[in-house]
Image (spheres, grey):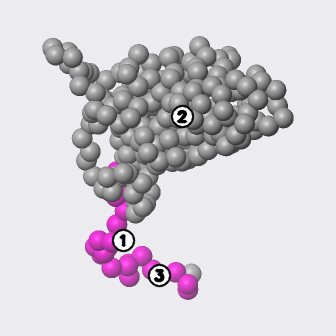
Amino acid sequence: MPDRTPLFLIPYPLPEDALTDYPALGSELANTIEGVFKAPSCRAYSDVGVSAPHNATTVVPLNRERWDTPHPSGGGMHDGTSAAPGRIYAPRAGIYAIHASMLVTAGGTPTNLNSYARLRHQNTNYIADVIVPWSAAAPAMTQARLTLSSVWALAFNEMVELCLFNSSGFAATINSSAVISPEFALTWLAPIPPGAAPLALDGRAWDEPREELPPLDYNGTILEPPEGIVLA
């Protein structure tokens, strides 16, 4: 056909940039598929109610998992028996979907309506929040149902928490209710795109190596293990 270049006129060997490395593409595709079907995921919850003092931020402790994924450092993404049972850690750098829900009961008729449920990253960044829909006219023991979600980029071993800031004027209760409260989930979605602005607190690029974080309490203080005890 006149609009086609005859095969014998195509220069040989082909320019290097015209060659396709099909084995490499196949390997990359296989790794991508494996990553999708083995995406790290964890959903933790508490089967007991949690007290939330007035004028304080309470990290919701979670004592059980509906499912979990092994973490390279040992254990899972969540450890309900650790010193910080409200945290879920990322076992792989990537973009994660985060979801949480809780039922909160006021301990009295609220005198301040600025109470929030929050998702917190690395003990510092609040990445999503929702106001507790209490009313100054509501009677004591009024229950509010809250849900939060976000999509966030996490470096290896960074963590997220579910928090309640209670400023109602009274202590509140985070109620335990099957499949609803409190529930907290973290699921890997995809790799972080090249060139993405760093969200890590240390400012390093996503693909730079990071040492494992030391165990911290809720105030960010490093927890020293008792003498003779080795932390996994």
Based on the picture, tell me whether residue 209 belongs to the magenta stretch: no
Task: In the rendered structure, find residue 18 and report the number of the disc placed on it.
Answer: 1
Q: Are marks 3 and 2 in contact (CB under 8 Å)?
A: no
Instruction: Return the residue nearer the eye: 213 or 218.
Output: 218
Image coordinates of residue 56 in percent, x first then y, are 54, 34
Which quarter of the rendering shows the N terminus? bottom right
Image coordinates of residue 214 in percent, x first then y, are 27, 33
- Residue range in magenta is 2-23
Q: Residue at x 41, y 32 (%)?
A: 218
Image quarter of residue 69: top left
Instruction: Return the residue nearer the eye: 52 or 79.
Output: 52
Task: In the rendered structure, find residue 5 and report the number of the disc placed on it.
Answer: 3
Tell me the chief SS of the magenta region: loop
Q: Residues within 10 Å of mark 3 (few under 14, many from 20)?
A: few
| Residue 21 shows in this picture | yes
Instruction: Return the residue nearer the eye: 206 or 58.
Output: 58
